[in-house]
Amino acid sequence: MFELKNYIKQKSRAVNDTLAQMMQNYQPDETISKAMKYSLMAGGKRIRPVLCLAASEAVGGGLKDAMRAACALEMVHTYSLIHDDLPAMDNDELRRGKPTCHVAFGEATAILAGDALLTMAFEILASVPFENGDQAGKWLQVMQIIASAAGSRGMIQGQMLDIAAEGRLLDVTDLESMHRLKTGALIEASLQCGALLAEADMTQQKSLNRYARNIGLAFQVADDILNVEGNPALMGKAVGTDQLNEKNTYPSLLGLDASKQFARDLIRQALQALEAFDNKAEPLRALATYIIERNR
Amino acid sequence: MFELKNYIKQKSRAVNDTLAQMMQNYQPDETISKAMKYSLMAGGKRIRPVLCLAASEAVGGGLKDAMRAACALEMVHTYSLIHDDLPAMDNDELRRGKPTCHVAFGEATAILAGDALLTMAFEILASVPFENGDQAGKWLQVMQIIASAAGSRGMIQGQMLDIAAEGRLLDVTDLESMHRLKTGALIEASLQCGALLAEADMTQQKSLNRYARNIGLAFQVADDILNVEGNPALMGKAVGTDQLNEKNTYPSLLGLDASKQFARDLIRQALQALEAFDNKAEPLRALATYIIERNR
């Protein structure tokens, strides 16, 4: 029986160690680095890096290449959280049980720390040592996947749709489009990068994309459900805030039970997408279930 | 006699056309794209792209490769202006004679438009069509140069130093360190990218770096002088604001005459660095002089 808890623990520890090392090698004593590190090492779940590593593993790839991409993905994710939390955006003061970056360091530094993490992600990727031109080309592709997922046709467009939706009632289709961009795009990119670096063939890439699309959306549905019935102590943030802020969520549109059913359907489809994979895909299978059963 | 005015006109028109085309191919009808385009096409001087193109030309390189890097550099520069203008930073309402991005589109959209331009710069670079692995490796290097110059060891650190210097009297050494990062780093990167893509040899690269360091600083000294005695109608922004905001500037530390002398000395050193180059470096030579003689 595959032990997901240990797997996540081990992989996220390796990610944490690598991220800490990368920050340490950078310019550890500057205020900007402290702000970057504060948010980067704030105890995130490391879902995107772990998915990237697990995707690489599922097609028989090694840890090393995927780890670089995994860390870059986490930097991009963290930058997006720092900027989303800003007063001009969601104006959140608490994240993972700690004051948000702008509360701890001031707004100007938080904006710059976000900018710096986004930039560092690309610097880390661009400075990969490569042995031949094929590898260099593969890393250009990784950077294209991440930039495209993070940019104004991906995650940023999702955030724009989220802002535009404030105070407006969305239907399920619009809500899904928004989430597919806001959180789905980077989750899909995480799987794509892991697969690409492990030299997945076209069929494998397609299956992993289907898996990614389904768990990406399920992840958001689960987040919405946690905001209704999660435990604030475990989550490190308040619950019930979506309803208070009149946010469009799956529970508010479909009801709680139908939302849970929807999440389970998505996970079932994600698992179907992995049918042709052998037991090297066990981590991905277990992660799919974890995504809707997690408590934070 | 080399005609700089025509050269700048011709090159910046080519840059503008390419940038407009890149934006048009992207997702032209979304609000986020409108905000990005608003700032990107707001009539900037295109100094960085023109320097990148001129560096490529100086070592016998073509326009096409350098143009991609030139446009990415201008996107990075524009993102930094959008974020610098934000209320939490310099709180500027006017840029190039037009309302700043956050005044025109709101603060949340402006933050995201800056993020999106930074991300798009890397997407444009990563999606370069390459014919062989050597080329792919060269583009990775270009991305590393730009990310490193723009990041928290370069431009962003310069902005942090600028913020920290508010209300504090700097000496000339600190002022220089700040400017070498805040504006110098990306100007140096512009020359480096042009040189690298044109396959400059080590001696040429060193000379161009020396040129870049000198004009980068001269550019800032000239900016400070323009803020004292420039014509606001030509500049599209107010003058005298540095003194009003008690900013550390070269005129405030050295006086106006000594600042002008300093700028001339820097340009002389920049020209010396180009001594071994033939007449293909005429644009770079003329640009050096232009940098301290411009009126906007």
Image (cartoon, coloured by chain):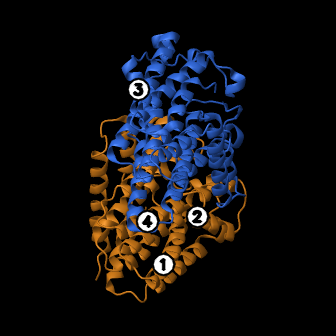
Chain colours: A orange, B blue
**Mark toward the viewer: 2 or 3:** 3
Residue flagged by tag 1: what amino acid is it? Tyr
The residue positioned 35% from the left and 76% from the top of the image is A283
Q: From the viewer's perspective, is A80 left or right of B45?
A: left
Q: Position of residue A151 (x, y in %)?
A: 55, 57
Q: Quadrant of the N terminus of chain B?
A: top right
Q: Chain of mark 1?
A: A
Residue flagged by tag 4: what amino acid is it? Val
Q: Secondary structure at mark 2?
A: helix
Q: Which residue is mark 3?
A: B269
Q: From the viewer's perspective, is B294 left or right of A6?
A: right
- Badge 3, how many Cα within 10 Å: few under 14, some, many 20+? some
Q: Which residue is mark 2?
A: A181
Check whether the beta carbons of the residues at disc 3 and disc 1 lie within 8 A of each other. Answer: no
Mark-to-mark CA distance, 3 and 1:
59 Å
Q: Which residue is mark 1?
A: A211
The residue positioned 64% from the left and 60% from the top of the image is B26
Q: From the viewer's perspective, is B276 left or right of B24?
A: left
**Mark toward the viewer: 4 or 1:** 4
